[in-house]
Image: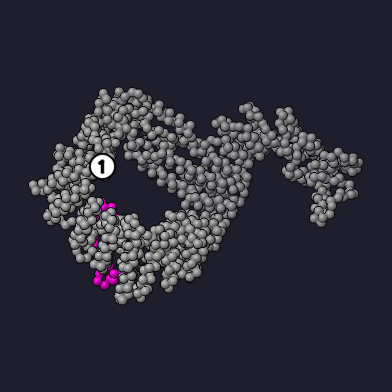
């Protein structure tokens, strides 16, 4: 545990970006030694809050020993956790005698800071792999002297420090209790250590008020004169706000008088409107209305004009006190101060406050009176926020009060529609039906800071603009934002229908733009009802109307529409079924969708699991040649491509790509990846090649697509394209390595802790694995004489980049070269492998050395075989497998002495030969015609207790035949049957090969193969043919439905199985002897 007074460091090191540790570590620093170390402050930045301590000479050796021990423990933990070394060391840096210190670990009176050159004592600890100093004190454990903090110390840090001192003693209103003596002394020390300007002190006060510490803010205000800071009007205003927060009205009035006194003395500015508003707010909260009235008179006497905030405070205070008449008088004064035109108003907050006061006083009818007065005296009428506040406040008060407001709004809207019927340019007046004054739509909070943009109501208030242009749409929008949010009660639909019926009854038409406002008000159910109502009014909905409806449904406001169709959705969830239903309606009414329509439909169709709708969207768009694609909709095009791929429609994908190319759409890496993946899912190889080539030309193909292209090209035997894709893989890897190198270098210089070293190491490891895997798979496919030259192409690309081949890639390349019997390729690979092993670029792995031995043997290079075996023995990785491969390589080189020597060396090193080893040895002896030695090796297996499997028998049969000892074949076959070894297809192929060899042998000159043996083997071959013919006849009988019966006659015995090897030994035994003449 950290010593008393120490706090956890905020960061692991100076200037470092704290990364995830490579292994789980405790966030609390771990003390390395019980010994206290001494040192000198090298430097300390009070703005950033950290610095470094140089360990003293007397403690340097002990500190180095403690750090070395900690590093050893960390390395052991890294190994146990399987963390790569590069990632493990990324979080620890050599201290070089300098220890990191954070201001939270400094014991100091006042702001925690250290003076450069100051002598200190500290505990040495380890935090996130870095050495840190904790519990930093002066020698002897006293608090450090510190330094007078710089001007750059942020006020936010001081405010947080004071908040920690306050603890539970401060609440929302400053708390009932003050600080303890110790906390008060420490706060005084903190304030005394600051060297600030008046602006910084004022900012500190404001931060304390925001954090709910107004008492501390007042203490700061009291301290400022002792620090030589002259308190200005702004600081006094913040103090008034703090005094109002704690309910100290007298102090707020005193501070206001202090501002006035400084102004009279010529030492400052007189109180401004903000100071008066803050003081009024304090009086209003304390219900001291007489003081509030006196302040209002004093404000006017000072030549200031009350603004909307002042009137809002007064009206709210009068309403809370139940004095509605005073509130009405204040509202009348506000209206009179604003002038004849309400377009000069700054905010509707006084009206909102009055609506609340009227409802609190039990007179909601006053709300209608105010709305009527505003509607009649100004061409523009009440603002949108005023309508919303009236409806929402009365709705909360009671249904009857809200209905009274709705009745007035209905009558007012009908009156405006009737008046607008005779106005010139009536329809054109709705060219822009969106209201411009999107001000505060809430019911009003009554705070000092409420306000809006000045003169917003003046827009559209020119003499040529008719009141229906603004007021009717505002009424509908306000109703939609209040009662329209709950369409289940049908109030919104009933409200609109009453307006339409009232206008029609008086011979007025409702413009389409007005109905569009009704359409956009409310939720999806309301939108559906409005679309139906528009059709009943013979106002055919347009594409824009459907776009509005879809936007509402996707926003998920209210209950789901189209409930009759069983597609309702819960409140707050997107109503995708409604969007899809409206898309189908647009098709029925032959409405041309735009890109915004398609974007919404695609999004909803995907969320609803309807990919066929997405496919239908593209069919509609592709059929309209006039629709031009735009760059902003690239996300939708990409989504359509993905869905078309899932639907298996490659033709549509290619058509979409061609259309995007023609319209100049710039595809990003994600779009190319999606196109390629979609075509891959469809199995459209030509489309994959086309999209890949286009992406390569734009240099927008991500590396995972390059890797996918390699696998696809290998599957389609397009090896040139596979090599080209591998070229891009290696190039992108090389480029990524350079970027990560620059990034790690920039972060590495920041200090200990290394900036994301563990994460970067893991990401690089995954990147290397993917790239190595695809290259390894590629070289393993180039195993024929026609394609083996691509092995060197891939290897050269890897050699030229930072993606160097590993031992697995070398093994695959050597295996392919050996299978293709490409000696020149094997020679190049072995030479480069030898160099890379010497340079340490490739790990010395037994698999790689084994493939090197096998490849050298296939190339017939006995010297290379011996050299690679010697290397394996030198590094101590030789096992029975590599020796067995070495014996096989010696057999390929036709070197019996090497094979026998390797068998002896294998036994000498404690490795027992297995069946594969003996099989390779027998093969080598057979190639040299040493049949007796081959038979001896075969018998040695019996003596050593090794199982002689079918592979050994096959090899021995060929060896005996190669030596011309054909008379031994029958005995071997009989022995094979005695051992219970079942022949396989290779055995039959061996017999066929032996028969061919017999036909080529000059029996007279050889004299080693009797006519009986030749006749027996020849007859065995005929027996196989007879068995095959009999099997075909039986199959024909079965097809005809006949019962299978044994065929009579014929000297050849019936074979129960289709292999000649099952009856061959019996035939040899029962063959009658032949005369000497026949033998000749």
Mark 1 highlights which residue? 173
Q: Which range of residues does the magenta coloring cover?
A: 444-468
The image quadrant that residue 404 belongs to is: bottom left
Tell me if residue 744 can be seen: yes
Q: How is the image coloured?
A: one colour
Residue 700 belongs to magenta span: no
Q: Position of residue 782 (x, y in %)?
A: 59, 48
In this view, 496 is above or below 1055 = below
In this view, 552 is above or below 997 = below
- In the displayed structure image, the side of residue 759 where residue 433 appears, left or right: left
Residue positioned 87% across, 40% down in the render: 1070
Q: Nearer the viewer, residue 574 or 1036?
A: 574
Residue positioned 44% across, 40% down in the render: 761
Q: Which of 692 and 203 is in front in this view?
A: 203
Q: Which of 894 and 559 is in front in this view?
A: 559
Number of marks in the image? 1
Residue 454 belongs to magenta span: yes
Residue positioned 63% across, 32% down in the render: 880
In this view, 618 is above or below 357 = below
Residue positioned 31% across, 28% down in the render: 4
Q: Where is residue 273 in the image (x, y as percent from the top left)?
A: 18, 53
Q: In which quarter of the image is the C terminus?
A: top right
State the residue lying farthest toward the left: 265
């Amino acid at each position: 545990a950290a010593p008393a007074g120490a706090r956890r460091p905020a960061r692991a090191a100076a200037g470092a970006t704290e990364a995830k540790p490579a292994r789980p570590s405790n966030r609390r620093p771990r003390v390395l030694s019980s010994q206290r170390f001494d040192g000198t402050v090298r430097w300390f930045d009070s703005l950033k809050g950290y610095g470094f301590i140089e360990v003293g000479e007397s403690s340097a050796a002990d500190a180095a020993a403690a750090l070395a021990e900690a590093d050893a423990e960390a390395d052991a933990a890294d190994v146990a956790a399987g963390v790569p070394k590069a990632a493990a060391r990324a979080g620890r840096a050599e201290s070089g005698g300098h220890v990191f210190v954070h201001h939270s670990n400094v014991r100091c009176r006042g702001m925690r800071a250290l003076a450069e050159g100051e002598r200190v004592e500290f505990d040495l600890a380890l935090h996130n792999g870095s050495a840190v100093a904790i519990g930093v004190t002066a020698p002897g454990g006293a608090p450090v002297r510190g330094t007078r903090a710089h001007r750059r110390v942020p006020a936010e840090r001081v405010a947080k420090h004071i908040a920690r001192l306050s603890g539970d003693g401060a609440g929302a209103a400053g708390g009932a209790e003050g600080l303890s003596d110790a906390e008060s002394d420490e706060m005084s020390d903190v304030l005394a250590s600051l060297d600030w300007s008046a602006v910084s002190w004022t900012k500190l006060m404001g931060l304390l008020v925001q954090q709910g510490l107004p008492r501390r803010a007042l203490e700061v205000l009291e301290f400022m004169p002792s620090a030589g800071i002259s308190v200005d009007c702004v600081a006094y205003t913040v103090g008034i706000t703090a005094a109002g927060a704690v309910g100290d009205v007298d102090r707020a009035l005193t501070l206001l008088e202090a501002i006035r006194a400084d102004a009279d003395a010529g030492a400052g500015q007189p109180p401004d409107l903000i100071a008066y508003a803050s003081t009024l707010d304090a009086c209003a909260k304390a219900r001291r209305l007489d003081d509030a009235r006196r302040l209002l008179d004093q404000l006017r006497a000072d030549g200031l004009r009350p603004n909307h905030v002042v009137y809002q405070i007064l009206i709210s205070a009068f309403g809370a006190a139940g004095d509605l008449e005073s509130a009405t008088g204040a509202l009348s004064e506000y209206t009179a101060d604003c002038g004849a035109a309400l377009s000069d108003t700054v905010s509707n907050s006084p009206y909102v406050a009055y609506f609340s006061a009227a409802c609190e006083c039990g007179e909601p009818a006053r709300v209608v009176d105010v709305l009527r007065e505003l509607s009649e005296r100004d061409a523009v009428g009440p603002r949108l926020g005023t309508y919303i506040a009236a409806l929402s406040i009365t709705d909360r008060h009671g249904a009857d009060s809200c209905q009274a407001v709705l009745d007035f709004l209905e009558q007012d809207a009908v009156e405006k529609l009737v008046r607008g019927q005779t106005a010139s340019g009536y329809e054109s007046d709705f060219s822009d039906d969106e209201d411009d004054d999107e001000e505060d739509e809430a019911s009003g909070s009554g705070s000092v800071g409420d306000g809006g943009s000045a003169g917003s109501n003046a827009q559209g208030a020119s003499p040529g603009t008719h009141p229906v242009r603004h007021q009717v749409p505002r009424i509908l929008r306000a109703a939609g934002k209040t009662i329209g949010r709950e369409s289940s009660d049908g109030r919104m639909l009933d409200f609109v229908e009453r307006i339409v019926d009232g206008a029609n009854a008086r011979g007025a038409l409702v413009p389409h733009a007005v109905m569009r406002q009704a359409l956009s008000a409310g939720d999806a159910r309301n939108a559906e009802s409005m679309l139906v109502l528009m059709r009943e009014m013979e106002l055919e909905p347009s594409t824009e109307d459907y776009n509005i409806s879809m936007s509402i449904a996707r926003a998920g406001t209210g209950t789901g529409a189209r409930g009759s169709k069983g597609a309702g959705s819960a409140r707050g969830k997107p109503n995708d079924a409604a969007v899809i239903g409206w898309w189908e309606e647009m098709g029925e009414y032959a409405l041309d969708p735009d890109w915004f329509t398609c974007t919404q439909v695609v999004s909803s169709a995907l969320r609803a699991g309807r990919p066929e709708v997405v496919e239908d969207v593209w069919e509609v768009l592709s059929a309209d040649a006039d629709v031009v694609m735009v760059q902003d909709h690239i996300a939708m095009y990409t989504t359509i491509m993905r869905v078309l791929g899932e639907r298996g429609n490659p033709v549509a994908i290619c058509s979409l790509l061609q259309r995007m190319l023609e319209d100049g759409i710039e595809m990003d890496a994600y779009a190319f990846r999606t196109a390629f993946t979609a075509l891959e899912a469809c199995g459209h190889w030509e489309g994959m090649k086309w999209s890949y080539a286009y992406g390569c030309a734009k240099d927008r193909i991500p590396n995972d697509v390059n890797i996918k292209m390699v696998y696809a090209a290998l599957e389609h035997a397009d090896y040139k394209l596979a090599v080209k894709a591998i070229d891009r893989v290696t190039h992108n890897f090389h480029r990524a390595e350079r970027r990560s190198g620059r990034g790690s270098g920039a972060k590495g210089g920041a200090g200990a802790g290394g900036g994301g070293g563990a994460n970067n190491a893991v990401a690089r490891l995954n990147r290397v694995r993917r790239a190595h895997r695809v290259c390894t798979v590629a070289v393993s496919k180039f195993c024929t004489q026609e394609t083996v030259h691509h092995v060197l192409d891939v290897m050269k690309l890897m050699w030229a980049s930072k993606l160097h081949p590993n031992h697995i890639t070398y093994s695959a390349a050597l295996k392919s070269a050996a299978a293709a019997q490409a000696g020149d390729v094997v020679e190049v690979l072995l030479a480069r492998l030898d160099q890379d092993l010497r340079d340490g670029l490739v790990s010395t792995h037994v698999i790689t050395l084994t493939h090197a031995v096998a490849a050298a043997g296939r190339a017939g290079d006995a010297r290379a075989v011996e050299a690679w075996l010697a290397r394996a023995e030198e590094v101590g990785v030789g096992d029975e497998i590599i020796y067995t491969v070495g014996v096989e390589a010696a057999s390929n080189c036709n070197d019996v002495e090497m094979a026998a020597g390797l068998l002896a060396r294998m036994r000498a090193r404690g490795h027992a030969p297995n069946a594969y080893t003996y099989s390779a040895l027998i093969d080598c002896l057979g190639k040299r015609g040493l049949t007796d030695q081959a038979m001896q090796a075969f018998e040695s297996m019996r003596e050593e207790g090794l199982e002689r499997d079918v592979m050994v028998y096959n090899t021995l049969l060929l060896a005996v035949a190669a030596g011309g000892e054909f008379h031994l074949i029958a005995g071997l076959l009989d022995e094979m049957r005695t051992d219970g070894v079942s022949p396989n297809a290779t055995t039959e192929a061996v017999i066929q090969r032996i028969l061919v060899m017999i036909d080529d042998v000059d029996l007279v000159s050889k004299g080693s193969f009797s006519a009986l043996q030749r006749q027996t083997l020849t007859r065995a071959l005929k027996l196989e043919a007879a068995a095959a013919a009999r099997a075909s006849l039986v199959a024909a009988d079965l097809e005809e439905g006949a019962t299978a019966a044994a065929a009579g006659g014929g000297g050849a015995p019936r074979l129960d199985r289709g292999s000649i090897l099952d009856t061959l030994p019996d035939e040899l035994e029962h063959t009658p002897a032949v005369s000497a003449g026949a033998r000749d």
